Image: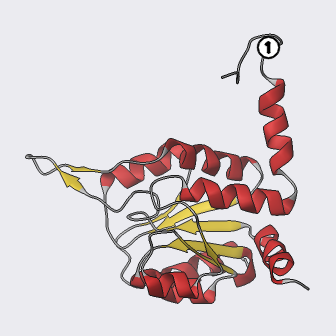
């Protein structure tokens, strides 16, 4: 079986997509205001991708080493209940999630960018690195995105997984069918 067919099979089997935050859902930058409030920028297309993933009957979660109120706000906005912040040992945290949900490791994909993500990337069914991840994480990953963290990499992976499952075309068709005839939507 060709490598790409095997990877597509593995991507199609994913039921749970777990994400690091800084460097994956964001570009890795953290901004602090003078009054000590932390700010992060999230990509809207990543957000829609996560909603589409969940509408397809799959789960998404966040596992991050830092703790931030804005991360919980974003998770709430996206309907992501599975949030683990301030995690020192990501492999231990993910193992607990996998056991709690009754999943096999092969049904789990983890997306990361730096060394604390490496143990999970090596253990899960599909390890994913963003384009600007450190070299060691890229080398360990089954998938390296074309896009960097915080710039649509999560959406890129979700589209690829939904295509592997045979569901992406139906999603696009539903959006296309929602356009009024003759509206000119999508014209340059």
**Residue at image location 38% in from the left, 64% down from the top:** 22
Q: Residue furthest right?
A: 1
Tell me which corner region of the image, top left, top right, bottom left or bottom right, holds residue 127.
bottom right
**Residue at image location 49% in from the left, 80% down from the top:** 93
State the residue in front, 17 or 93: 17
Looking at the picture, how far across and down is residue 44, in whole percent?
51, 42
> Can residue 4 be seen by looking at this rendering?
yes
Whether residue 111 sits left or right of residue 84 in the image: it is: right
Looking at the picture, how far across and down is residue 123, in whole percent?
61, 89
The N terminus lies in quadrant: bottom right
State the residue in front, 40 or 135: 135
**Residue at image location 41% in from the left, 79% down from the top:** 114
Q: Residue furthest front?
A: 188
Q: Is residue 164 above or below residue 78?
A: below
Looking at the picture, how far across and down is residue 52, in whole percent?
69, 46
Report the coloring of the rendering.
secondary structure
State the residue in front, 159 or 32: 159
Q: Is residue 42 above or below residue 90?
A: above
The C terminus lies in quadrant: top right
Q: Is residue 75 above or below residue 111?
A: above
Whether residue 36 sits left or right of residue 58 in the image: it is: left
**Residue at image location 81% in from the left, 68% down from the top:** 12
Looking at the picture, how far across and down is residue 78, in whole percent?
54, 45
State the residue in front, 94 or 138: 138
SS category of the residue bearing label 1: loop
Tell me which corner region of the image, top left, top right, bottom left or bottom right, holds residue 57.
bottom right
Whether residue 100 sits left or right of residue 161 in the image: it is: left
Tell me which corner region of the image, top left, top right, bottom left or bottom right, holds residue 7.
bottom right
Q: Neighbour class for label 1 at 10 Å: few (<14), some, many (≥20)?
A: few
Q: Is residue 66 above or below residue 184?
A: below
- The residue labelled by disc 1 is 180
> Can residue 92 be seen by looking at this rendering?
no
């Amino acid at each position: 079986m060709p490598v790409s067919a095997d990877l597509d099979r593995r991507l199609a089997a994913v039921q749970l997509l777990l994400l690091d935050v800084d460097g994956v859902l964001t570009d890795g930058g953290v901004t602090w205001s003078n009054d000590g409030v932390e700010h992060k920028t999230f990509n809207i297309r990543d957000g829609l991708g996560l909603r589409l993933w969940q509408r397809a009957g799959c789960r998404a979660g966040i596992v991050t080493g830092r703790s931030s109120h804005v991360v919980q706000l974003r998770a709430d906005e996206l309907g992501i209940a599975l949030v683990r912040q301030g995690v020192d040992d990501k492999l231990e945290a993910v193992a607990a999630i996998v056991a709690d949900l009754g999943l096999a490791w092969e049904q789990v994909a983890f997306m990361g960018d730096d060394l604390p993500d490496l143990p999970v990337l090596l253990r899960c069914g599909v390890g994913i690195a963003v384009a600007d991840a450190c070299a060691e994480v890229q080398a360990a990953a089954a998938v390296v995105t074309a896009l960097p963290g915080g710039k649509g990499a999560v959406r890129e992976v979700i589209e690829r997984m939904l295509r592997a499952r045979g569901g992406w075309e139906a999603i696009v068709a539903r959006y296309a069918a929602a356009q009024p005839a003759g509206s000119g939507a999508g014209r340059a």
